Image (cartoon, helix red, strand yellow):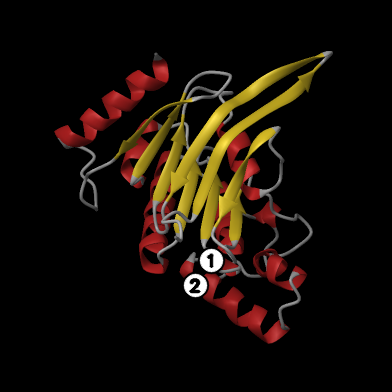
Amino acid sequence: MESEYILSTKNIDKSFKLDSSKQKVLDDISVDIKPGEFVCFVGPSGCGKSTLLRLISGLMKPDSGGVTMKPKTKLAFVFQNFGLFPWLTVEQNIGFGLKMNGVPKETIDAEVKKQISQMRLQGFETKHPKELSGGMKQRVGIARALSVKPDILLLDEPFSALDTFTAENLRQDLLNIWQKQQLTVVMVSHLVEEAVELSDKVVIFSAKPGRIKKEIKINLARSRDKRSTQFFNYVDEISALVQS
């Protein structure tokens, strides 16, 4: 019987070497994510949220346990620090992954043009990262990730380096793209309000070593009223779990 989940982690442990000893970062992490679900990982600083995202992406390997995905599932990663190549233009950064995959130039050009429009980067096509604001850099990072047409989009605190107004605009753009393209999104956040605003499900981690304290489904209609009692109730419940 085919699994209903597009992504599962099972009993993942991960440690890092610290001087002559090992420090455990993740302990027995099992998470199941359905196709089209928007999931946020929250928890104290250093609890292994970003490490888990890298284990899911394949950038790291677990010490034990594993990650399973539906066959032919394609991943893309958006980094907190943008991860752009400073010597490439906006257009070249967006098309980089496609070029590395041997996609024909005509196809790359068409997809880059589409992402430029979708992420509202018109007029910045030939700019280099040093000429862009933080918000524009992250728009390029998201456009690059989306250009490869992923099934799962992984985001590591993508809005944490941005001012409040820019972050809110990008959150709304991300929600619109998620709903339009029926993506599965897995995002690390340090803001509980952000997680409640965006997520179908919030996974709360304990302090180091990271263990899953609880998974909470956010049963609020979209778009979400951030001033509602129900919204604040979710924020209070999750915040108490993070801080305890």
Residue drawn at the location 67% of the way across and 86% of the way down: 106
The 10 Å Cα crowd at callout 2, few under 14, some 14 to 19, many 20 or more, is: few
Q: Residue furthest left?
A: 229
- Above or below 30: residue 39: below
Q: Which of 160/55 is in front?
A: 55
Q: Position of residue 206 (x, y in %)?
A: 48, 21
Q: Quadrant of the C terminus?
A: top left
Q: For the residue marked with disc 2, what is the amino acid? A: Ser
The 10 Å Cα crowd at callout 1, few under 14, some 14 to 19, many 20 or more, is: some
- Above or below 126: residue 137: above
Q: Are marks 1 and 2 in contact (CB under 8 Å)?
A: yes
Quadrant of residue 110 in the image?
bottom right
Q: Quadrant of the N terminus?
A: bottom left
Q: Which mark is residue 199?
A: none
- Above or below 179: residue 208: above
Q: CA distance from mark 1 to mark 2?
A: 6 Å
Q: Is residue 1 left or right of residue 142?
A: left
Q: Is residue 177 visible?
A: yes
Q: Is residue 133 visible?
A: no
SS for callout 1: loop
Q: Residue furthest right?
A: 20
- Residue beneath disc 2: 117
Q: Position of residue 149 (x, y in %)?
A: 55, 69
Q: Position of residue 163 (x, y in %)?
A: 47, 40
Q: Which mark is residue 121?
A: 1
Q: For the residue marked with disc 1, what is the amino acid? A: Leu
Q: Is residue 100 left or right of residue 230?
A: right
Q: Which of 120/48 is in front?
A: 48
Q: Which of 226/74 is in front?
A: 74
Residue drawn at the location 69% of the way across and 54% of the way down: 84
Q: Is residue 150 left or right of residue 196?
A: right
